[in-house]
Image (cartoon, grey):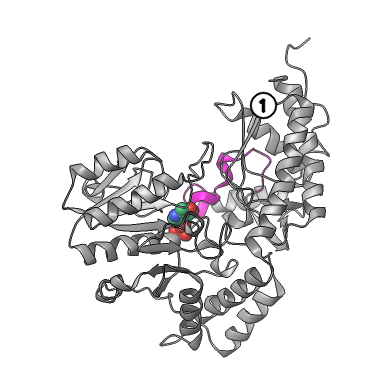
């Protein structure tokens, strides 16, 4: 008899993956590694699909026809529901007029006005396409304003995939990183210590909305740290940059640090601004207007009108529906249900971060085996979760979707308890 009990009810049969398997095979021949970047399913449980066919609301359908409640929301961009009618109608209306033309559309001015009205720290905005465009441009503007070189970030924080900030070393030179400094996350004393080493040459301190590093318990910002970072920038003349790319519009429509009473000089946004249409932006204070003007900021697709029309509609829905509060309520329903299941099965489960962006980690799970099993079984029962990355709630997650997901996680929690025992 095996010492390890078998997993009870791993769910309906393992999902068939014929089309997914065939696509992976074809992709391997024409795409390095078969898939790249954060959406590569190679680090997910083996039965997870790589390819999807369609989505509606908070439901995803993979290429083999399996439907699941999605808690990744395209890694954040989906915020009011896949194929939200109001957003898609605004996008289609603009597409009929024209998307990318030889200059921007009226939507760009409307959206800039809307964002300046919404974000108390912003007097102007510049638009891009991806979060890395926005964080990189923030740093460039801070350097243009200060004439300084050094940029200080929290160790382990993700700010994008460009050579100056990517956490992965391949293809990156020491010179690319020569002006990047790290401090211990959330440690004001260390932030001050490192800043002191480059006094007079510190262009910017880049902070995350909250600590959301891969595979670690998430941590909300300590208001004392936030105030201390602001004070340090004021004392030294460095610019405070808030990277709101991941959390933006989920925690607070005015910016994620607004509830702390701490305003950045510059902020970087992307992901959720247009409910999946490609858009990013930098927002800044008046005193950086001239520096922003002086930087050559551009990209072939940055001025497309469709994503801007989608962003205007997304903001309208989020404001009307009290977006962050509703997402928090949905996330709390999920969190409460999971906590109850963990208690019932005697499983040590840690849930961290804001309920709108939950992360699940199991006690003693250094190799993420419990998390992988949990996600694998939950997927078979109809819920798409992530074993290491924070997840995302949206306005499309209604009570019945959360309850359907909890039925799936109940089976998954039982499987973890059966395989690994009570903890
Ligand atoms: C906090 C943060 N900053 C920057 C980025 C980079 O955004 P993008 O992948 O759109 O370039 C991300 C992406 O996940 C992010 O989470």
| Residue 190 in sight from this viewpoint | yes
Quadrant in which the C terminus appears: top right
Image spot of residue 217 (x, y percent): 54, 36
User: Who is closer to the viewer here, 148 or 192?
Assistant: 192
Q: Which residue, given by chain and number where applicable, does mark 1 sit on? A: 348
Give how far across and how far down residue 278 sits, in percent.
Answer: 52, 69
Residue 234 position, x and y percent, is 27, 57
Q: In this picture, is 411 found above or below 168?
A: above
Residue nearest the viewer, comparing 104 with 399: 399
Q: Which residue is found at the position 33% from the left and 57% from the top?
A: 240
The correct choice, above or below, for 418 with respect to 289 in the image is above
Residue 67 covered by magenta stretch: no
Q: Identify the residue shown where x is 56% and y is 60%.
A: 252
Name the quadrant of the N terminus: top right
Count the labels in the image.
Answer: 1
Does ligand 1 reach within 8 Å of label 1's beta carbon?
no
Residue 17 appears anywhere in the view: no
What span is in magenta? 29-49
102, 228: nearer the viewer:
228
Q: Position of residue 322 (x, y in %)?
A: 66, 65
Q: Secondary structure at mark 1?
A: loop
Residue 48 on the magenta segment: yes
Residue reaching furthest to the top: 1
Which of the 4 image quadrants contains residue 182?
top left
> Dominant secondary structure of the magenta stretch?
loop
Within-10-Å neighbours for mark 1: few <14, some 14–19, many 20+ = some
11 on left or right of 40? right
From this view, report whether residue 12 is shown above or below residue 293: above
Q: Quadrant of residue 189?
A: top left
Give the quarter of the image for residue 415.
top right
């Amino acid at each position: 008899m095996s010492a390890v009990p078998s997993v009870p009810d791993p769910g309906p049969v393992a999902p068939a993956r014929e089309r997914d398997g065939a696509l992976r095979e074809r992709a391997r021949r024409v795409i390095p590694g078969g898939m790249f970047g954060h959406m590569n399913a190679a680090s997910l449980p083996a039965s997870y699909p790589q390819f999807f066919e369609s989505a509606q609301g908070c439901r995803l359908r993979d290429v083999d026809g399996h439907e699941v409640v999605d808690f990744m929301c395209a890694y954040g961009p989906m915020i009011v529901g896949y194929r939200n009618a109001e957003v898609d109608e605004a996008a289609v209306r603009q597409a009929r007029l024209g998307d990318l033309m030889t200059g921007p559309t009226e939507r760009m001015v409307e959206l800039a006005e809307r964002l300046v009205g919404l974000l108390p720290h912003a007097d102007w905005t510049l638009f891009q396409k991806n979060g890395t465009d926005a964080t990189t441009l923030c740093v460039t503007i801070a350097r243009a304003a200060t004439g300084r070189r050094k940029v200080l970030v929290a160790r382990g924080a993700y700010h994008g995939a460009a050579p100056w900030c990517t956490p992965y070393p391949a293809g990156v030179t020491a010179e690319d990183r020569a002006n990047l400094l790290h401090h211990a996350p959330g440690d004001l004393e260390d932030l001050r210590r490192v800043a002191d080493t480059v006094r007079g040459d510190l262009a910017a301190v880049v902070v995350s909305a909250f600590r959301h590093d891969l595979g670690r318990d998430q941590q909300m910002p300590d208001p004392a740290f936030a105030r201390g970072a602001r004070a340090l920038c004021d004392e030294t003349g460095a610019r405070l940059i808030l990277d709101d790319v991941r959390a933006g519009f989920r925690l607070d429509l005015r910016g994620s640090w607004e509830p702390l009473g701490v305003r950045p000089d510059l902020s970087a946004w992307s992901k959720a601004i247009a409910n999946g249409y490609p858009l990013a932006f930098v927002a800044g204070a008046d005193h950086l207007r001239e520096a922003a003007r002086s930087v050559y900021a551009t990209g072939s697709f940055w001025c497309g009108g469709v994503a801007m029309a989608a962003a205007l509609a997304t903001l309208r829905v989020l404001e009307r529906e009290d977006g962050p509060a509703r997402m928090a309520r949905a996330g709390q329903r999920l969190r409460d249900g999971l906590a109850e299941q963990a208690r019932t099965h005697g499983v040590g489960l840690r849930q961290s971060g804001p309920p709108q962006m939950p992360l699940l980690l199991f006690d003693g799970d250094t190799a993420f085996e419990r998390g992988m099993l949990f996600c694998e079984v939950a997927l078979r029962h109809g819920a798409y979760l992530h074993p290491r990355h924070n997840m995302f709630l949206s306005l499309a997650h209604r009570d019945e979707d959360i309850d359907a997901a909890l039925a799936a996680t109940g089976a998954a929690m039982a499987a973890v308890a059966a395989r690994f025992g009570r903890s």
